Image (cartoon, rainbow, N blue to C red):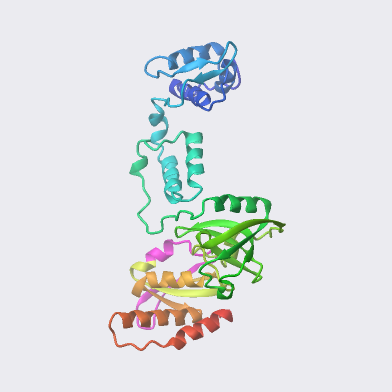
């Protein structure tokens, strides 16, 4: 008898364990399998014989006189694999999320290979197509330059500064055609975009870059020291509104009404979020959420997404931007509304002042 006994395993599970060891290509010998299963070598011989016949018909052969077990060809599939793995909804849900979310990203093939390697998950596994992410417009973009991914991964691994030029430089229009030098901190995938978060030396500031807007990308040999707080999540003001950050963290207060109340209470919007139920000045019940964030424009998007069921209260810059956008929407809808551009200008001044 070898190793710890696995008497609690069914015969089907033991046969499957033998199959996975052989399918891994490690050419296990009878002694290796006996240790793995915690049984005698004679039992292994019997299991191998059973695998070679109906209903398994495994194409097992021994390599040389003293070699290990192998499969002839690489197309054999264990007939009861679906029964053992296919109905594990937790595993399938996680796998489906990973595969769908990263479908067009450079990580997809690696994730798929890992899933197939670890849990033998196949594309035709039963129930896999019965689990799905809801359709979204934010499908992950394919990289324009596939070799950029290797350059980025290498620079991240070695802490090497990247040199490139960048399109759509809305934050730094003066650098639209300039050569940038960036210390790469982290890769992010958000809203369907492959992003790089790092430190822009030309501005002495942190920035997010869309990888598809980079060109003439070069990994330099110049090293940098990675700071302890390099992760993007440390620069959002402890809020969770995706890959966006701008000015210093500020306190936000937003009122929600009617159906939006229950939805907002279910969300994990920020680490320090708190809720208060009260009645507004017009007698309507509402819930006010208070939290800290540095993701101002994403919060404005969130307020607008909730239509007439949300109303920003603080900071003043958010209130002004919201009023400016509401005025434009009303004018676009045909109402006789005058859009005051001073609202936007004042909002920008307050944002830069941290108010």
The answer to whether residue 172 is above or below residue 81 is below
Residue 156 position, x and y percent, is: 63, 53
Residue 170 position, x and y percent, is: 52, 72
Instruction: Locate residue 211 relative to residue 80 in the image: left or right.
Output: right
Residue at 50% across, 15% down: 61
The answer to whether residue 311 is above or below residue 263 is below
Q: Could you tell me which quadrant the C terminus lies in?
A: bottom right
Viewer-side residue, 80 vs 60: 60
Viewer-side residue, 265 vs 147: 147
The answer to whether residue 20 is above or below residue 339 is above
Residue 256 position, x and y percent, is: 39, 72
Instruction: Locate residue 249 relative to residue 324 in the image: left or right.
Output: right
In this orientation, does residue 289 appear? no
Q: How many marks?
A: 0
State yes or no: residue 350 in magenta.
Answer: no
Residue 218 position, x and y percent, is: 62, 57
Q: Which residues are magenta?
A: 262-289
Residue at 56% across, 56% down: 187
In this orientation, does residue 28 appear? yes
Q: Could you tell me which quadrant the N terminus lies in?
A: top right
Residue furthest out toward the left: 334
Among the 4 quarters of the image, the one containing residue 34: top right
Viewer-side residue, 276 vs 235: 235
Instruction: Locate residue 124 relative to residue 109 in the image: left or right.
Output: left
State yes or no: residue 269 in magenta.
Answer: yes
């Amino acid at each position: 008898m070898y190793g710890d006994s696995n008497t609690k395993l069914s015969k089907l599970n033991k046969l499957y364990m033998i199959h996975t060891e052989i399918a891994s290509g490690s050419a296990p010998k009878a002694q290796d399998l006996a240790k793995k299963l915690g049984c005698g070598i004679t039992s292994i011989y019997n299991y191998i014989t059973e695998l070679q016949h109906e209903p398994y018909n495994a194409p097992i052969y021994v390599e040389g006189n003293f070699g290990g077990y192998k499969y002839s060809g690489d197309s054999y599939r264990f007939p009861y694999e679906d029964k053992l793995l296919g109905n594990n909804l937790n595993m399938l849900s996680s796998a489906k999320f990973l595969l769908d979310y990263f479908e067009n990203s450079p990580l997809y093939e690696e994730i798929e290979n890992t899933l197939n390697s670890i849990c033998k998950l196949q594309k035709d596994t039963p129930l896999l197509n019965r689990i799905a992410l809801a359709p979204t417009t934010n499908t992950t973009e394919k990289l324009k330059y596939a070799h950029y991914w290797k350059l980025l991964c290498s620079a991240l691994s070695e802490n090497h500064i990247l040199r490139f030029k960048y399109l759509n430089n809305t934050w730094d229009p003066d650098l639209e055609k300039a050569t940038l030098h960036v210390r790469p901190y982290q890769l992010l995938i958000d809203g369907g975009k492959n992003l790089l978060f790092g430190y822009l030396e030309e501005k002495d500031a942190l920035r997010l870059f869309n990888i598809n807007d980079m060109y003439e990308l070069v990994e330099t040999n110049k090293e940098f020291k990675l700071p302890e707080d390099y992760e993007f999540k440390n620069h959002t003001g402890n809020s969770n509104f995706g890959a966006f950050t701008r000015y210093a963290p500020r306190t936000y207060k937003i009122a929600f009404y009617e159906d939006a109340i229950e939805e907002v209470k279910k969300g994990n919007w920020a680490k320090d979020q708190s809720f208060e139920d009260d009645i507004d000045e017009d007698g309507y019940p509402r819930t006010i959420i208070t939290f800290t964030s540095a993701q101002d424009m994403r919060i404005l998007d969130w307020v607008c997404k909730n239509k007439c069921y949300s109303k920003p209260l603080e900071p003043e810059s958010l209130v002004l931007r919201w009023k400016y956008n509401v005025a434009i929407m009303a004018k676009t809808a045909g109402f006789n509304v005058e859009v005051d551009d001073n609202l936007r200008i004042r909002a920008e001044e307050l944002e830069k002042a941290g108010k």
